[in-house]
Each structure stands twice: as C-alpha cells, then as structure tokens.
Image (cartoon, helix red, strand yellow):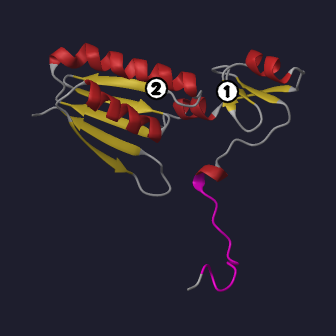
Amino acid sequence: MSTGFKRPYRGSVPRSRKATQVFEAHKGIVVCKTCGAAYFKKRWTHGLEELRVKEGKDEAVSFAVCPACQMIANRQYEGRITVKNLPAQHEKDLEDVVRGFSRRAFERDVMHRLIGIKKTGANWVITTTENEMAGKMAHHIKESLRGAKSRTHFAGDPSDVAEIVIDFSE
C-alpha cells in the first residue's frame, strides 16, 4: 500500500486572491487616515497607542487608507444581506441585532465593518466589508428573529461577494 505520491509535486501552486491583495508590507507602523486603525507586523489593529505600549519602542509612522475604508469609499462590499417581508414588530429588534453584532465584530477585528443599512418598506439591505461576517450575521439574525428562511449565494471568481437572502414571508 502506497503512503504518498510516487514522485514529488513540482508544479507551482497559484496564489489565492487574498494573498495578492494583502496590504503592502511597510517598515514601521501605518495608520489609516480615515479611521485611525494601525497596520503593524502584517496585521490591522485598533489604535496606535496599544501598539506602542506592547512593543515598548518607537517605530516609523506613515499614513495610508486601510482596505476597509477603501472599500467603503469605492462603494464596494463583500457581504450583502437582503431581508424580505420583515414584520413591523421586528424592525427595532433587527436593527438592534445588526448594530450589536457589527459592534462586536469590529471590536474583534478592525476590518469587519457594517457599511450600511438601506430600508425600503418591509425590505432591508445590509452591506458589510467581509463575506464571512455577513454569513455569521445572517445566522445570528435567523436565530434571534425566529420564522425566517435564508439562502446564500457566493459570486464566482474573481469576486468574494456573499449574497444572503432572509425571507420572513411565511
């Protein structure tokens, strides 16, 4: 019985889209001009003060726009939740659930943001900067407000957009 490949794999593995879109590595700290998030050691974090306390030394500081602020400025999104036929008694609850979930997601990761909530009668469209956040938010909405059915559609390559429809029609 064979335990592996007969000969070593010599081909190159294509880089993921995420890997090619990683923010350029910089020396020192990069601070977002818009939101104040700081990029240090290949990671965006909350605030510059926390980094200086953790590292204990001064680093060169430069300014740029973080990927989340750039997406918002370009009117792009990776997650879109469409809520259809929302009962009137659940409107306040839905807004509280969305705002609370977004606040907690932002506290965990500075790149997870709520872009906007567009209300059109009983239909709402919620956009986020991360598709994974949108999926978890939709699940949280379904659990919090019983009686909804959902379906998820992921757009094909090269896009990472997740489109989720939550329907309260029954």
Q: Which residue appears at 45% of the width and 35% of the height? A: 133
Which of 7/168 is in front?
7
Q: Which residue appears at 58% of the width and 84% of the height? A: 2
Is residue 136 positioned above or below 8 on the image?
above
Q: Horizontal and vertical percent for residue 148?
A: 19, 33
Q: Disc 2 designates what residue?
A: 114
Q: Which residue appears at 65% of the width and 68% of the height? A: 13
Q: Amino acid at mark 2?
A: Leu
Q: Disc 1 designates what residue?
A: 45
Q: Amino acid at mark 1?
A: Thr
Residues in magenta?
3-17
Are discs 1 and 2 less than 8 Å apart at CB? no
Q: Is residue 6 magenta?
A: yes
Q: Horizontal and vertical percent for residue 139?
A: 33, 35
Inter-mark Cα distance, 1 to 2? 17 Å
Q: Nearer the viewer, mark 1 or mark 2?
A: 1
Instruction: Locate the N terminus and report the quarter of the image it occupies.
Output: bottom right
